[in-house]
Image (cartoon, helix red, strand yellow):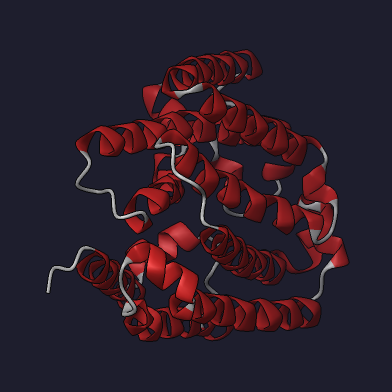
């Protein structure tokens, strides 16, 4: 059924691909219609590639998903979509995405291939290696951010890439903690790497990544290099939104056992949604001198 193919594509996860717009926004080029068009096309291409990867991951995990309380009803795990149908969908999405990527520019195409290779390796083996599993997911976000810069032919900010990496690690380890608590004794059966984690270990790692995200973002906003490049020294005014957003997310992880899906949390938790919206508006007002 068409609805099952849409579920496989996971359009709700496409929000992650808006990271590709970060380079455009922080380069102060949102008013450049040509680059804006290229950036939006890049987002669309990564939505196609991401959907292919999600489908591939569900294909590989279909037997394990049958044992998961939430994932057992997914199209492949439930048998509503066959292996052959899912394979055809994966190949079609990859083909369309890569052809479109070539028309952006050849560097963007190469980055797209790296994105596919890394995530394919994750689906087949890297997701079973403790810590590496989350690092790979974080690198996928870094690749997205870098791809956004390549698409519009601007240098990728090292600060932007580092901040993206640390924030993705924070969210990734938070997700692992949620899975570990949710699945309890069946955790290792569903995902091999979960057998090597413990709530205490993940709490320690989350503590380190929390501090790292905040420190890196603060250093980014206070950097003379960044201030000179962006033409403003006021980006530090966005720090309170980041601090509250991180602490609110920690509250959701530890007190309400949420965090399994950062995307869902963003849309369902009103304080998080409001904080992200206010942070984005503050960034736009500061970088584009709208006050």
Q: How many marks?
A: 0
Quadrant where the N terminus is found in the figure = top left
Quarter of the image holding residue 268? Answer: bottom left
Quadrant where the C terminus is found in the figure = bottom left
| Left or right: 207, with 125 as reference point | left
Residue 222 position, x and y percent, is: 46, 81
Quarter of the image holding residue 91? Answer: top right
Residue 254 position, x and y percent, is: 58, 83
Residue 50 position, x and y percent, is: 52, 35
User: Would residue 52 be seen by someone viewing this image from the given angle?
Assistant: no
Residue 25 position, x and y percent, is: 33, 54
Q: Nearer the viewer, residue 228 or 138?
A: 228
User: Would residue 165 be seen by someone viewing this image from the given angle?
Assistant: yes
| Left or right: 234, with 194 as reference point | left
| Left or right: 129, with 102 as reference point | right
Q: Nearer the viewer, residue 143 or 226?
A: 226
At x 61% / y 70%, what residue is drawn?
A: 170
| Left or right: 161, with 15 as reference point | right
At x 61% / y 80%, what residue is drawn?
A: 210
At x 42% / y 24%, what residue is drawn?
A: 104
Q: Nearer the viewer, residue 193 or 34?
A: 34
From the viewer's perspective, is residue 289 above or below residue 264?
below
In the picture as drawn, the residue positioned furthest to the left comes out as 291
Quarter of the image holding residue 184? Answer: bottom right
At x 63% / y 62%, what residue is drawn?
A: 172
């Amino acid at each position: 059924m068409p609805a099952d193919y849409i579920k496989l594509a996971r359009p709700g996860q496409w929000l992650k691909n808006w990271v590709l717009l970060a380079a455009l926004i922080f380069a102060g080029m949102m008013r450049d219609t040509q680059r804006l068009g290229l950036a939006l096309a890049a987002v669309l291409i990564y939505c196609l590639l991401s959907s292919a990867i999600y489908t591939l991951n569900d294909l590989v995990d279909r037997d394990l998903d049958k044992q998961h309380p939430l994932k057992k009803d997914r199209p492949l795990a439930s048998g509503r979509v066959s292996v052959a149908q899912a394979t055809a969908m994966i190949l079609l999405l990859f083909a369309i995405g890569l052809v479109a990527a070539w028309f952006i520019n050849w560097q963007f195409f190469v980055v797209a291939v790296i994105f596919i290779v890394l995530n394919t390796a994750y689906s087949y083996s890297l997701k079973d290696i403790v810590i590496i599993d989350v690092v790979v997911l974080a690198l996928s976000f870094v690749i997205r951010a870098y791809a956004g810069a390549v698409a519009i032919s601007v240098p990728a900010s090292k600060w932007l890439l580092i901040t993206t990496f640390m924030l993705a690690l924070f969210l990734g380890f938070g997700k692992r903690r949620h899975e570990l608590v949710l699945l309890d004794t069946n955790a290792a059966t569903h995902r091999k790497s979960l057998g090597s984690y413990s709530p205490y270990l993940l709490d320690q790692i989350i503590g380190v990544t929390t501090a790292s995200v905040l420190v890196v973002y603060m250093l980014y906003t206070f950097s003379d290099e960044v201030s000179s490049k962006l033409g403003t020294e006021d980006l530090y005014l966005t720090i309170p939104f980041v601090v509250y957003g991180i602490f609110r997310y920690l509250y959701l992880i530890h007190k309400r056992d949420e965090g399994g899906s950062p995307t869902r949390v963003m849309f369902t938790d009103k304080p998080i949604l409001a904080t992200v919206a206010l942070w984005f508006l503050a960034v736009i007002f500061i970088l584009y001198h709208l006050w």
